[in-house]
Amino acid sequence: MSQSSKKELLRYDQRVVAAKSIEKVVAGQHASISEIAARIRHLAEAPLTVVVLGEFSAGKSSFLNRLLAADALPMAILPKTATLTRLVHAGQGEVGRVEIDRRGALCIETEVISHQDFSELQRAAKVHDITVAQDLGRIREVRVFLDEPLLTKLQLVDTPGFNHDQAMDDRTLGILDSADIVLWITDAVQPAKQTEFEKLRLLKARGKRIWLIVNKADVNVVDGTAWEESRRSLEAYFSEIGFLEFFESKTVELISCRETGEFWDGKFEQAKARLGNEIFNQDATWSHRLISDEWERLKQTLED
């Protein structure tokens, strides 16, 4: 469904209308009520925000590049660079545009560059240039504009990842309030670590809807038989330790973002198709469900 169709469909939803009225009445007097009402309006009017989370170096950027079949994201600017990257649909004349928000002396300053210059920034960072590293440390968010139909229905957000340093954890946690749906990437070599449990409990406590993707499966898998054995083994293990309880789907998506060829391309396309059926092509349905979640939270907050 197109974004305009979704907006028209939800325009007269009673919960959306009531939330807008409540938002006007409280007008900043009650922060929590204003925040929930604004969330309901966002869900009715804006593309869903799908945030890709997981531990540092789990393959989040590689997954998004593979999903969009584009070299949209740098996959390793610097380990200590805590930058959020938002992929948004490009309007007329915006294809190839990149906006970089930097922390200035008094405010956030936005620079507009080309995707080619963005790639050059990535290459400069990899040689550990001190000046470039200091500049990267000031970056708060990057927005990459792409001519991708999927982005008309949702925005995709790449995150620095957890469990590397506190700055990266803090920046990643800062996106959670605006996350509508979460894709959690775990590493097939060391999946379901205790540190992942800690962050997933936090996500569930905030009412987030989460899907699991297991990346880097090529390390232990060489053919279809080994892939199926690995998938079944992981599903049994995840179920036994309670890892699957965090996720909407109990099916393990076992992929490799770095390996190509007929086998791994096929597995990625299968996972992409399932995500399309459950999330990407169901944006209006999920907007309805998430509005219902927020409406219940708003009623409870008003009662309290």
Image (cartoon, rainbow, N blue to C red):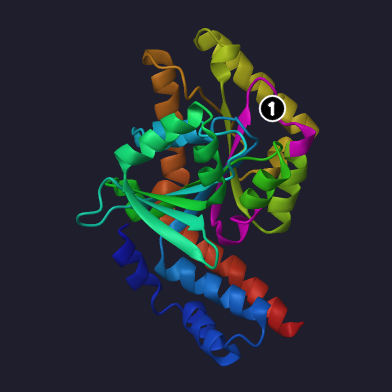
> Does the magenta portion include 210?
no
- Badge 1 crowding class, 10 Å Cα cut-off, few under 14, some 14 to 19, many 20 or more, is some
Q: Quadrant of the N terminus?
A: bottom left
| Picture quadrant of residue 3 | bottom left
Q: Is residue 113 left or right of residue 159?
A: left
Q: Amino acid at mark 1?
A: Pro
Expressed as whole percent of the image width and height from the top left, the position of residue 281 reads 38, 49
Expressed as whole percent of the image width and height from the top left, the position of residue 284 reads 41, 60
Q: Nearer the viewer, residue 87 or 260?
A: 87
Expressed as whole percent of the image width and height from the top left, the position of residue 228 reads 57, 16
| Picture quadrant of residue 72 | top left
Expressed as whole percent of the image width and height from the top left, the position of residue 238 reads 72, 30
Up the image or down, 63 lies above or below 263; here it is below
Residue at 77% x, 37% y is 195
Magenta part of the chain: 173-195
Q: Is residue 239 left or right of residue 83?
A: right
Up the image or down, 94 lies above or below 290; here it is above
Residue at 42% x, 47% y is 280
User: What residue did someone put label 1 on?
Assistant: 191
